[in-house]
Amino acid sequence: MDLKPFKKSFELGGKTVTLETGRIARQATGSVLVTVDDISVLGTVVGAKEAKPGQPFFPLTVNYFEKTYAVGKIPGGFFKREGRPSEKETLTSRLIDRPIRPLFPNGFMNEVQVITTVMSSSKNQDPDIAAMLAASAALSISGIPFDGPIGASRVGYTNERGYFLNPTFEELQTSLLDMVVAGTEDAVLMVESEAKGLTEDQMLGGVLYGHQEMQTAVTAIKEFAAEIGKPRWDWQPAAENTELLNAIKADFAGAIEEAYGIRDKMARYERLGEVKAAAVEKLAGEEEGQPSEDEVKKYFGKI
């Protein structure tokens, strides 16, 4: 990534959104500061170039932090430091995690950490949408294999105004709908909503409205990444270990089929566990060229 500061602005729901990189967190794999009015959220992404040997899962960490300095305060009293994540921080972390997690390619096991930190906040609006855009933009410029970007929008609804974007806290008091929609150019990936007596058609209309309106963010982040982003990593999924798969089939397919014929659920699970343990004992090892215990369990589950 070119470390020279770079900015791009676009309109979303009548507000100017600014994406900026190259000034803060320059050593991260990708970092973007998103500013919407008085709200500023820093999104940083750090990814490992290699996966840990034998790791059977994708270690993605997504965290959202609200610091008291974002509203010009410093903790007082007995506790002078920031405490553990609040319920709001945990829920917003999940809000960011859900739409980005399925956009990493199958078989990608490199550790990735996505951290969004509220640098400046507003009394009028929630910074969660800015945080989602910051995470999306940071991933898009990082070069990490990621089939994004995503856009996000908050949708309100009243009988007088119909659907509208970016409702303030005050407007949400009278709104019949509080919906967060996230997705890519082609698909809706996440909907979080709270409504008061709306029909299914009205709820579906809110989803479609939010997805349509967020396209300006998706397009802007794509253009931002094309201008300043790192080249995409030359990553390929690991080749399937057909030799191990065939060995498990040859030695244990009959026992697995027999176990699935047991009608009692607990007895069936117990027998499958015994067969799996036998497969691990026979095939797994620590010597070079031998599959790990996790790898044997992985291919055992494919049968």
Image (cartoon, rainbow, N blue to C red):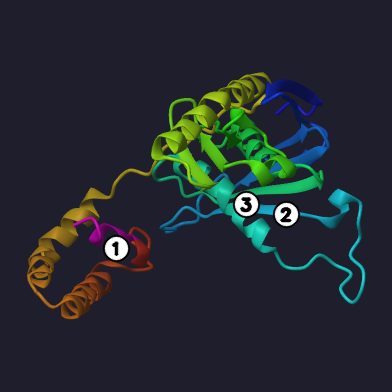
Q: Which residue is mark 2?
A: 65
Q: Quadrant of residue 23?
A: top right
* C-alpha span from label 2 to label 1: 39 Å
**Mark closer to the chain start, 3 or 2:** 2
Relative depth, front residue between 40 and 45: 40
Q: Position of residue 245 (x, y in %)?
A: 21, 55
Q: Position of residue 275 (x, y in %)?
A: 19, 73
Q: Position of residue 224 (x, y in %)?
A: 66, 22
Q: Which residue is mark 1?
A: 296
Relative depth, front residue between 201 and 123: 201
Task: Tell me the element at label 1.
Answer: helix
Question: Is 37 left or right of 293, judged from the image as shown?
Answer: right
Task: Tell me the element at label 3.
Answer: helix
Amino acid beneath label 2? Phe
Q: Which residue is mark 3?
A: 92
* C-alpha span from label 1 to label 3: 36 Å
Question: Is 143 left or right of 245, judged from the image as shown?
Answer: right
Magenta residues span 295-303
Q: Quadrant of the N terminus?
A: top right
Above or below, comparing residue 112 to residue 157 in the picture: below
Above or below, comparing residue 117 to residue 277 in the picture: above
Above or below, comparing residue 26 to residue 18 in the picture: below
For mark 1, does the 10 Å Cα neighbourhood hold few (<14), some (14 to 19), or many (20 or more) residues?
many
